[in-house]
Amino acid sequence: MTREEVLRNFQAPWSSFDNPDQTTWAPVATVGAIELWVLAANTTGALVTGAKKPKQKLNDNGSGYSINTKSLVVAAKFGGVSVIATGDATGLTLAHVLNVLEKPGVTARLGTVLMITAPHHGSDTTTYSLNGGKSKSGRAMGKAVVQ
């Protein structure tokens, strides 16, 4: 991909699994036998379902929180096993990631998830609390992503 194609693909919010047609799913990059899949890129809070924060507080206001909400969350897959790297993703970003993971076929495409990194250095409020939010299916978002 060219730089322009990558930037265009990462418009808010974006993941490798956005298209309902699973035959269009492809990693954003392949390095040897390693596939890189995007679970979340440029997430904006107003577009995250299941979050309990008021929408006006979720908009991109240039704060560190809103910038971290746009963190890139990727899965690196090798030999049927994936490692998910969350960067400085906030709870809202993880809420979006959970919504992506709940789409039919996504977890099968990623294979066994061996490890997930701890966003925000393992912060309890990011990793588990997620402001009390729940996914579309009613599961607690932080614990479901970590599981």
Image: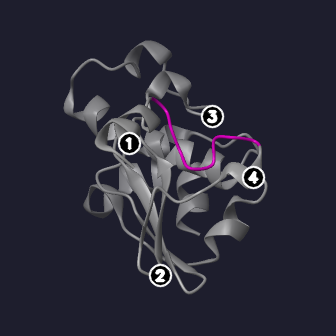
Instruction: Measure the C-alpha gap from mark 1 to mark 4.
Output: 20 Å
Image quadrant occupied by the C terminus: bottom right
**Mark 4 packing: few (<14 Cα in 10 Å), some, or many (20+)?**
some
Looking at the image, is mark 3 or mark 2 nearer the viewer? Answer: 2
Q: Mark 4 points at which residue?
A: 22
> Residue 138, located in which quarter of the rendered image?
top right
Circle 3 sits on which residue? 50
Would you say the residues marked 3 and 2 are in contact, meaning their CB atoms lie under 8 Å apart?
no
CB of mark 2 within 8 Å of CB of mark 4?
no
Q: Mark 2 points at which residue?
A: 33
Residue position marked by numbered label 1 in the rendering? 6
Spot the residue most to the front.
Answer: 2
For the residues labelled 1 and 4, say whether their Cβ atoms are less than 8 Å apart.
no
Q: How crowded is mark 2: few (under 14 residues within 10 Å), some or many (20 or more)?
A: few
Give neighbour class at mark 3: few <14, some 14-19, many 20+ (Cα, 10 Å): many
Q: Position of residue 117 (x, y in %)?
A: 37, 68
Q: What residue type is labelled 1?
A: Val
Tell whether position 141 is magenta: no
**Taking the image as drawn, is residue 103 in sight?**
no
